[in-house]
């Protein structure tokens, strides 16, 4: 009997802890790392993971539910007969899976880190919902509010122009302009509901969204700054020798969307007075391997 009770308590939603459902894409990167850190720091709640399953160009060929962020085997997988190119306003198969998860695992709160591969049904449960702004998607289908410069306005016409002409910032070629407009409109309806909060790392994110659309003034924003709450104290260090070159650390994955062109165009000027260290630059970092004054460490373990 005791063994049976113990096994029941191991099932998410059947112990006394509140249940949070994290919603994320299948693309890895910084959002996935953030989620790992979040779950590692939170032992007071059960943190289930609902991950979209990417297949070729479809961002949502289905969804998988994981009991823990580090699990390789899901609790359950739902494969869709109708795939989600990027994001959709509604999706009956997705909705049935979502309703099943909320019911069977007693979900109390939704934490939405990404809507890539998901349906906006996820914002329509009536449960307390936090949308975490790791980027500007889906309001900005290009993710970075960048089209020839930082965007200050964007209507349906500009969405079409961005789809055709902003080729370096168009990761979802199957996400057509008309659907982008529909998703944006439905997203604006849902995030203005009283049960939804948008969490931002800086006030500037909210300011940028409000500049793009005045309706964001009706949204509940909460700013949670980057970092661990307390700044690290400055370490006393000796002044460098007068002839020593400056060392500049570029931390994390490099790509066209993450400033590769800016860095490449700056190297000649920077190299006159500094050495550049690319740490964790991944595959793109390899192309800098033989540049003068550049040191590349493509991968690293966080523990190191």
Image (spheres, helix red, strand yellow):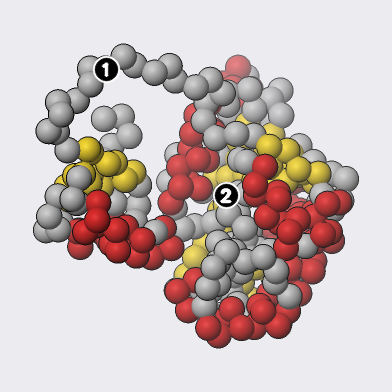
Mark 1 surroundings within 10 Å by alpha-carbon count, few (fewer than 14), some (14 through 19), many (20 or more):
few
Quadrant location of the N terminus in the rendered image? top right
Alpha-carbon span between mark 2 and mark 1: 34 Å
- Residue at coordinates 31% horizontally, 45% vertically from top-left? 250
Where is residue 33 drawn, in percent x and y?
A: 45, 42
Left or right: 132 as drawn, with respect to 227: right
Q: Residue 147's image quarter?
A: bottom right
User: Of 72 and 115, which appears nearest the observer?
Assistant: 115
Q: Residue at x 54, y 56 (%)?
A: 25
Most foreground residue, 24 or 232: 232
* Residue 127 seen anywhere in this rendered image of the structure: no
Disc 2 is placed on an element classified as: loop
Q: Which residue is mark 2?
A: 134
In the image, residue 89 sits, relative to residue 208, either above or below, namely: below
Q: Nearer the viewer, residue 176 or 271?
A: 271
Q: Name the secondary structure under disc 1.
A: loop
Q: Residue furthest front?
A: 242
> Horizontal and vertical percent for residue 277?
23, 44
Q: Which residue is rendered at x = 80% and y = 55% of the image?
A: 216
Q: Earlier in the sequence, mark 2 or mark 1?
A: 2
Quadrant location of the C terminus in the rendered image: top left
Q: Nearer the viewer, mark 2 or mark 1?
A: 1
> Which residue bears the numbered disc 1?
237
Q: Residue 42 in the image: x percent, y percent? A: 58, 26
């Amino acid at each position: 009997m005791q063994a049976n009770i113990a096994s029941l308590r191991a099932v998410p939603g059947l112990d006394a802890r509140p249940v949070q459902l994290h919603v994320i894409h299948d693309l890895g990167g910084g959002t996935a790392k953030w989620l790992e850190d979040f779950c590692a720091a939170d032992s007071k709640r059960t943190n289930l993971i609902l991950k979209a399953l990417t297949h070729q160009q479809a961002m949502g060929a289905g969804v998988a539910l994981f009991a823990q962020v580090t699990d390789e085997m899901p609790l359950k997988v739902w494969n869709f007969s109708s795939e989600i190119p990027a994001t959709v306003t509604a999706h009956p198969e997705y909705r049935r899976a979502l309703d099943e998860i909320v019911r069977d695992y007693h979900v109390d709160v939704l934490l939405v880190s990404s809507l890539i591969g998901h349906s906006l049904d996820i914002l329509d449960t009536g449960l307390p919902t936090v949308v975490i702004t790791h980027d500007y998607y889906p309001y900005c289908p290009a993710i970075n509010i960048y089209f020839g410069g930082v965007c200050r306005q964007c209507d349906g016409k500009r969405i079409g122009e961005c789809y055709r002409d902003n080729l370096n910032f168009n990761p979802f070629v199957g996400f057509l302009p008309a659907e982008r407009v529909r998703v944006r409109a439905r997203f604006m309806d849902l995030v203005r509901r009283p049960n939804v909060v948008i969490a931002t790392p800086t006030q500037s994110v909210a300011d940028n969204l409000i500049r793009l659309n005045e309706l964001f003034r009706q949204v509940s924003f909460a700013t949670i700054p980057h970092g661990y709450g307390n700044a690290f104290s400055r370490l006393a260090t000796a002044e460098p020798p007068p002839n020593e070159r400056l060392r500049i650390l570029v931390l994390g994955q490099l790509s066209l969307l993450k400033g590769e062109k800016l860095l490449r165009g700056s190297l000649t000027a920077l190299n006159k007075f500094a050495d550049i260290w690319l740490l964790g630059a991944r595959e793109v970092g390899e192309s800098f391997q033989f540049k003068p004054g550049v040191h590349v460490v493509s991968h690293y373990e966080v523990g190191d």
